[in-house]
Amino acid sequence: MKKESLLKEELKRGQADPLPVMEHFYTLQGEGAWTGEPAYFVRLAGCDVGCHWCDVKESWKVSPDQYHKGKEIANWVESSGSQRVVITGGEPTIYDLGPLTQEFSAKGIKTHIETAGVHPYTGKFDWICFSPKKFLKPREEYYQLANELKIIIYNKHDFKWAEEHAEKCHPQTQLFLQVEWTKRAELSQEIIDYIKRNPKWRLSQQTHKYLDIP
């Protein structure tokens, strides 16, 4: 079945358990507010945002052999010894995440999500990293839910776009600018200079790529 058909089917039936997992691993958080902290990453398969510069396009595809029950997923995290899990994608809000986050909560595992916020919020998270994209409009609810706003800078026009999103966020939301990886030589200094002029922003880097870790 094609990716688009699988995604439509998931949305239609509100699939909550099992969920398709493209990959999972224990590593250090490489970006944003929790950079350097150990965390177990669960990357759900399926995405309808379609960023042309996405560096994990293989996560867009959903296949029947990727499905795992929430209890099994939670056991992976518990067995690793990690006290924190990051649900990412793909775009994880395609799915109802309530049953999965209940499994983590029952084990005392802190639960984070990385999302473009394009589908309704489900589940219970200790930290929400909201990273809106131009390719699919985010839902308004995420501006007040977000603990962290992370804007990817792909060109100079994105600074204005970043400010438009920051204005809509809760005053306590932490604000981050992160260069798109292939543009780092061209735009990193631009971002540094912008943050020096606008210190409400902080710099996020993909430190895991520099360190060559997952």
Image: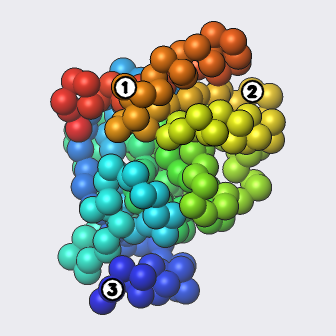
Of mark 3 and mark 1, the one earlier in the sequence is 3
Q: Quadrant of the C terminus?
A: top left
Q: Is residue 74 visible?
A: no
Query: Mark 3 touching mark 2, by CB under 8 A?
Result: no
Measuring from the top left, give residue 116's x and y in whole percent. Answer: 56, 53
Measuring from the top left, give residue 126's x and y in whole percent. Answer: 57, 39
* Residue 161 marker: none
Q: Nearer the viewer, mark 3 or mark 2?
A: 3
Query: Mark 2 touching mark 1, by CB under 8 A?
Result: no
- The answer to whether 110 is drawn above or below residue 193 in the figure is below
Q: Badge 2: how crowded within 10 Å, few (<14), some, or many (20+)? A: few
Q: Amino acid at mark 3?
A: Lys
Measuring from the top left, give residue 145's x and y in whole percent. Answer: 71, 44
Q: Which residue is mark 3?
A: 2
Residue drawn where x is 39% and y is 41% of the image: 85
Q: Residue furthest top?
A: 196
Measuring from the top left, give residue 37's x and y in whole percent. Answer: 38, 23
Q: Nearer the viewer, mark 3 or mark 1?
A: 1
Q: Which residue is mark 2?
A: 172
Per the model, the C-alpha gap separating discs 3 and 2 is 41 Å
Could you say which is closer to the camera, residue 95 or residue 190?
Answer: 190
Residue drawn where x is 50% and y is 40% of the image: 154
Q: Which residue is mark 1?
A: 185
Q: Amino acid at mark 1?
A: Ala
Image color mode:
rainbow
- Determine which quarter of the picture holds residue 38: top left
Of mark 2 and mark 1, the one earlier in the sequence is 2
Per the model, the C-alpha gap separating discs 3 and 1 is 37 Å
Q: Quadrant of the N terminus?
A: bottom left
Regarding mark 1 in the picture, which secondary structure is present there? helix
Regarding mark 2 in the picture, which secondary structure is present there? loop
